[in-house]
Amino acid sequence: MGMENNDKYTGEYKDGQQQGRVNYTCPDGSKYVGELKDGKMHGQGTLTYPDGKKYVGRFKNSHSHGQGTITYSDGAKYVGEWKSGEMDGQGTIIYSDGAKYVGGFKNNAFHGQGTITHANGNIYVGEWKDAQRHGQGTGTFPDGMTYVGEWKDGEMDGQGTSTYSDGTKYVAEWKNGLLDGQVTIIFKSGDYCVGESKDGEEQGEFIYFTADGKRL
C-alpha cells in the first residue's frame, strides 16, 4: 500500500515524495504511523486496518518485511519474520482458541520444523510442508496415543510406531492415517505378533510369539 493523492497525510516531503516519519489515513480507513521512503512504507511502522487488525514492525517497499507482530481482531497473534508481506521465516502464532504454533513459515504457511499445541492436548513436533504435517514427526493425541514416524499431507504415512495408553505398541507401515502393510504388535508383557494390514484392517492370520521369540 503506497500513498495516494486522496490520503490524509501529515509528514515531510523530499523531491516531491513523502519522506521520513509520517501519520496518514487511507480512503479505506487504514492508518499508518511510521517511516516512509520514496512515498512507500519503509522502516519501522504501525499499520492499523479498518477491521481492527494491527501490524507493528518493519516494512520494505510498503510490505511487511523483517521482524514484526500482527494482532487480529479475534485476538490471534503472530510474532516473527516476514518477507514481502507474508509470514516467512521463524515465528510464533497464537490462536484465539489457545492453540499455539512455534516454528518455520513460508508463504504464510507452516513450513520446515515446527511444533503445534492444541487446546485439547493434541501436540505435533516435526516437519511441515505447505501447512501440512509432512516428513518426520511425533504426534501426541488426547487419548494418550503417541505416533513417531513419517507423515504425508497431514496424515501418518510411511514407517512409524504408535504407542497406546495401555502400553501396546504398533511398529508398522501406514497410509493415509491407517495401518497398511507389515505390522508388528508388541504387548505390554513383551509378547508380540506379526502380520499384514490393509486400509486399517487385518489381512489373514497374525503369528504370535513370546517375549523371548518362541512361537505360540
Image (cartoon, grey):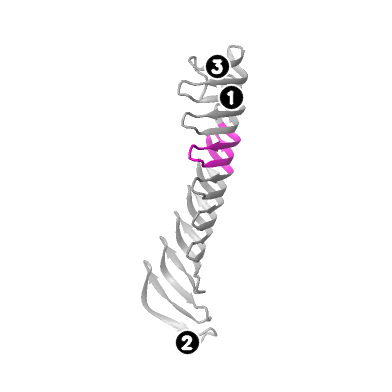
Numbered marks: total: 3
Percent position (x, y) of residue 49?
49, 29
Mark identifier at residue 9: 3
Mark identifier at residue 215: 2
Instruction: Kindly report the distance in space between the C-alpha atoms of the residues bearing marks 3 and 2.
Output: 83 Å
N-terminal of the two: label 3 or label 2? 3
> Does dot 3 land on a helix, a strand or a loop?
strand
Instruction: Kindly report the distance in space between the C-alpha atoms of the residues bearing marks 1 and 2.
Output: 75 Å
Q: Amino acid at mark 3?
A: Tyr
Percent position (x, y) of residue 151?
48, 58
* Residue situated in front as seen by the camera: 143 or 41: 143
Q: Is residue 159 above or below residue 206?
A: above
Viewed as shown, does residue 15 lie left or right of 107? right
Q: Residues within 10 Å of mark 1 (few under 14, many from 20)?
A: some
Q: Nearer the viewer, mark 1 or mark 2?
A: 1
Percent position (x, y) of residue 109?
50, 44
Residue 84 in view (yes/no): no
> Does dot 1 land on a helix, a strand or a loop?
strand
Tell me which residue sits at (50%, 34%) in the image: 53
N-terminal of the two: label 3 or label 1? 3
Q: Amino acid at mark 2?
A: Arg
Residue 203 in view (yes/no): yes
User: What is the quadrant of the C terminus in the image?
Assistant: bottom left
Tell me which residue sits at (49%, 32%) in the image: 52
N-terminal of the two: label 1 or label 2? 1
Q: Is residue 37 above or below residue 175?
A: above
**Residue 80, picture quadrant:** top right
Mark identifier at residue 33: 1
Which residues, given as a range, are shown in magenta?
A: 64-90
Q: Is residue 56 above or below residue 13?
A: below
